[in-house]
Amino acid sequence: MNKTISKIAVLTSGGDSPGMNAAIRSVVRSCAYHRIDCVGIFRGYQGMIEGDFKEMNARSVNHIINKGGTILKSARSKDFMTKEGRLKAFYQLKNHNVDAFVVIGGDGSFTGAMVFNKEFDFPIIGIPGTIDNDIYGTNFTLGYDTALNTAVEAIDKIRDTASSHNRLFFVEVMGRDVGHIALNVGVGAGAEEILIPEEDLGLDRLLDSLKKSRKSGKTSSIVVVAEGDKTGDNVFELAKYIEEHMPTYEVRVSVLGHMQRGGSPSCFDRVLASRMGVKAIETLLDGKSNYMIGIKDNKMILTPLDMAIKGETEIDAELIQVSDIMTT
């Protein structure tokens, strides 16, 4: 890629995550620093197709580093999944004199970007924004740290009620296919058991563990469940099974849901977003494209988008061992 870049667009796509605004701010101000024009695209790829663009400068992103969500809004676009839709998006970019774009999102957003790059040889860089931390090529995705803190704070409050009423709480956290949130939150909140997709605990072992905890004198318990866990059909069926086999426990279910995606980003996510935004612009200006920005060993790294999409993250085996010890 040897194209001169004078204007860069930025958009957010897919589910929102804390830190997206900080990343937008970083991209816009990095463009201003390098004297490159910047344009924001509203509503993700759908806004790209419809030409929902707005010129942005350093002052456009004042006071957003601390805000959750995304000022550019986000959406999933079925139109962009078609070649006709992507062609409309390409014409909109050309009509607005955009030479490259930065997409902040997850694997679905990156898949769209990769296809677009292949069809039109259009310079693209991805910034991973998803609380699930399920993108290959980075130790941390934007919003993950904030989501952990939000979930731990919620579980700390739930434990107060569990202790007061001698209840067993099943707390479901996000993590469609991976257990990163559940494992870390479970250890951080002192859960009695942690159920994740990567480790099939099984109903019998879970029941035995809870009975052991009961005999040891525990009058209340917290079980953290990743939404993608397969121990039961769902968290409510799981709770029903335990209640039937342990009638001495009053069982409750709390699904934290989308509250984990909201709120002011943590300091870690704000700094990470700022670093990723700067690296994204520098990468484009270096003539590189079709990469995702990541962090490994506290260093900014580049991972080809196809690897980021196809690669699988690994659960922390050491932390699983820690959780086993802590729930003894």
Image: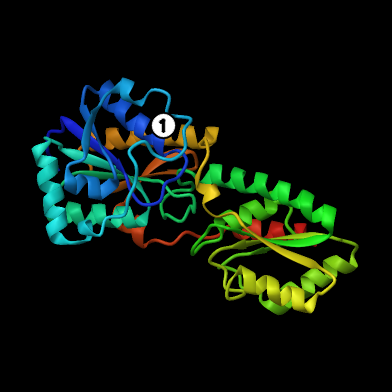
Q: Which residue is mark 1?
A: 274
Mark 1 element type: helix
Q: What is the crowding at mark 1: few (fewer than 14 residues within 10 Å), some, or many (at least 20)? A: many
Badge count? 1
Of the residues shown, which amino acid type is indicated by label 1? Ser
State left or right for residue 299 relative to residue 193.
left
Q: Is residue 232 visible?
A: yes
Q: Position of residue 316 (x, y in %)?
A: 58, 57
Residue in the picture at 30% in, 29% down: 28
Q: Position of residue 273 (x, y in %)?
A: 42, 36
State left or right for residue 128 relative to residue 85.
right
Residue in the picture at 36% in, 48% down: 105
- Coloring scheme used: rainbow
Position of the N terminus by quadrant: top left
Q: Quadrant of residue 136?
A: bottom left
Q: Relative to the observer, which residue lies in front, 154 or 297?
A: 154
Residue in the picture at 21% in, 26% down: 36
Above or below for 291 versus 284:
below
Q: Position of residue 112 (x, y in %)?
A: 25, 55
Position of the C terminus by quadrant: bottom right
Q: Is residue 289 visible?
A: no
Q: Relative to the observer, which residue lies in front, 252 or 326?
A: 252
Q: Position of residue 206 (x, y in %)?
A: 72, 72
Above or below for 278 versus 165:
above
